[in-house]
Amino acid sequence: MANQQLTDVKTLRARARQNIEEGAVTSTYQADRAAVLKMLNDALATELVCALRYRRHYFMAKGLESKSVADEFLVHSNQELEHADRIAERIVQLGGAPDLAPDTLSGRSHAEYVEAKSLVDMIKEDLVAERIAIDSYREMVQFLGENDSTSRRLLEQILEVEEEHAEELSDFLQDMCCS
């Protein structure tokens, strides 16, 4: 890569004028846009399902130890919604449309919507969902490689937060099971 020449300004300007209706997607975009859009819409569905599951768990958490855990469920729900918004924005940048259809959301999500009854079960289900998201995002990052560095960086940033969620949930679980 060190020997690679930069494109001359005249060529850059000419390329920029071609297909301007495609916005941010230029002729040098190397990824399979249809595959990336599907992948991002599936990630969007996953984030929304996780946000809804966390939100339910926030409202349904009961017991002496529930306040701090419930508060964290709400924080996680809000962060999942932020992820969904960022993914939807990227989908639009790539010339796609965010698929927010409620009827197909859970079917497209990698994570499941499990209500759970007890606080421990809620934590376990949320931890399972985070672990699914972690593996899914790692695979997406590898799939994108250098072909769509913007989407890759977005997913890497989301992956970092999902790993933090998993660690927090694991700590809650250990504290509840071992205290």
Image (cartoon, rainbow, N blue to C red):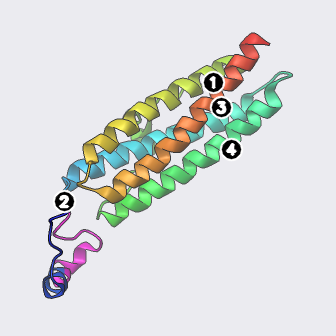
Q: CA distance from mark 3 to mark 4?
A: 11 Å
Q: In which image quadrant can residue 175 be found?
A: top right
Q: Nearer the viewer, mark 3 or mark 2?
A: 2
Q: Earlier in the sequence, mark 1 or mark 4?
A: 4
As measured in the structure, the alpha-carbon distance from the residue carrying label 1 to the one carrying label 4 is: 16 Å
Q: Quadrant of the N terminus?
A: bottom left
Quadrant location of the C terminus in the rendered image: top right
| Image coords of residue 77 (percent x, y) | 62, 42
Nearer to me, 53 or 35: 35
Q: Examine the rendering and report whether any part of residue 112 can be seen.
A: no
Q: Nearer the viewer, residue 113 or 125?
A: 125
Question: Given contact means CB atoms under 8 Å apart, are the residues at marks 2 and 1 in contact?
Answer: no
The residue segment tinted magenta is 16-29
Q: Residue furthest right?
A: 64
The amino acid marked with disc number 1 is: Ser
Q: Main secondary structure of the magenta part?
A: loop
Identified by mark 2, the residue type is Met
How crowded pointer 4 is (Cα within 10 Å; few <14, some 14-19, many 20+) is rated as some
Residue drawn at (42%, 54%) of the image: 154
Q: Mark 4 = which residue?
A: 75
**Would residue 146 be found to the left or right of residue 103 on screen?**
left
Closer to us: 133 or 119: 133
Residue behind mark 1 = 170
3D distance between C-alphas at marks 3 and 1: 5 Å
